């Protein structure tokens, strides 16, 4: 087998089809069948996520507030279908949701942030206003066996799913 990778760009949204007709190659001909692949290009999403820790430095077993801001640059409200933040992106023994202070949410929907757990989620029912933001604030605590150093809490694409689109990669 042979694999050829190329990076492509598109000026406009839509479906782009790449077709290879059946044929052969080489001095001892190797035949191959036709094949196609379709790339769907979507417009940039109106929704995004930003995050911060306060304080941004803590000691082992120390608590920091993780503020997750859901942004909507679009002209219509974005109904939240789901949101998930897995704290294990910072390492298997990194941080967990702390018991105090209580997590807060002004996005609506049902926030799940159980003390001791490593996943923060928001179920459907929330809304990010048009041209606005809403916030989820969750206390997190560094584990006692945590290896000290910098950690980045990453949100992969589609961590936030809304009626106005999904997020791109977020750190």
Image: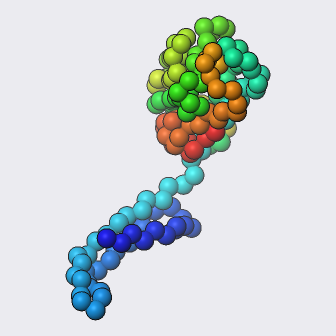
Q: Is residue 25 above or below residue 41?
A: below
For the point 56% across and 24% down, the residue is 93
Left or right of residue 31: residue 11: right
Left or right of residue 21: residue 131: right
- Camera-side residue: 105 or 53? 53
Specify the quadrant that holds the N terminus.
Answer: bottom left
Q: How is the image coloured?
A: rainbow
Q: Is residue 13 above or below residue 32?
A: above
Q: Position of residue 20 (x, y in %)?
A: 32, 77
Specify the quadrant that holds the C terminus.
Answer: top right
Q: Name the outermost residue toward the bottom.
A: 27
Q: Position of residue 26 (x, y in %)?
A: 30, 88
Q: Position of residue 19 (x, y in %)?
A: 34, 74
Left or right of residue 168: residue 21: left
For the point 56% across and 30% down, the residue is 91
Q: Quadrant of residue 27?
A: bottom left
Please say whether residue 33 is visible from this viewpoint: yes
Q: Quadrant of residue 150?
A: top right
For the point 24% across and 89% down, the residue is 28
Q: Position of residue 129 (x, y in %)?
A: 62, 31
Q: How many marks?
A: 0
- Camera-side residue: 13 or 68? 68
- Camera-side residue: 9 or 54? 54
For the point 54% across and 54% down, the residue is 43
Please say whether residue 63 is visible from this viewpoint: no
């Amino acid at each position: 087998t042979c694999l050829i990778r190329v990076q492509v760009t598109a000026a406009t949204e839509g479906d782009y089809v790449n077709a290879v007709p059946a044929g052969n190659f080489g001095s001892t001909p190797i035949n191959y069948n036709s094949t196609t692949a379709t790339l769907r290009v979507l417009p940039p999403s109106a929704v995004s996520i930003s995050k911060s820790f306060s304080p941004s430095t803590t000691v082992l077993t120390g608590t920091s507030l993780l503020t997750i801001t859901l942004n909507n640059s679009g002209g219509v409200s974005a109904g939240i279908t789901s949101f998930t933040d897995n704290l294990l992106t910072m390492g298997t023994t990194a941080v967990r949701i702390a018991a105090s202070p209580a997590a807060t949410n002004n996005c609506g929907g049902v926030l799940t942030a159980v003390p001791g757990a490593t996943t923060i989620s928001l179920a459907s029912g929330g809304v990010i206003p048009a041209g606005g933001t809403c916030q989820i604030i969750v206390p997190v605590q560094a584990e006692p066996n945590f290896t000290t150093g910098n950690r980045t809490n990453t949100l992969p694409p589609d961590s936030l799913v809304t009626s106005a689109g999904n997020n791109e990669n977020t750190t």
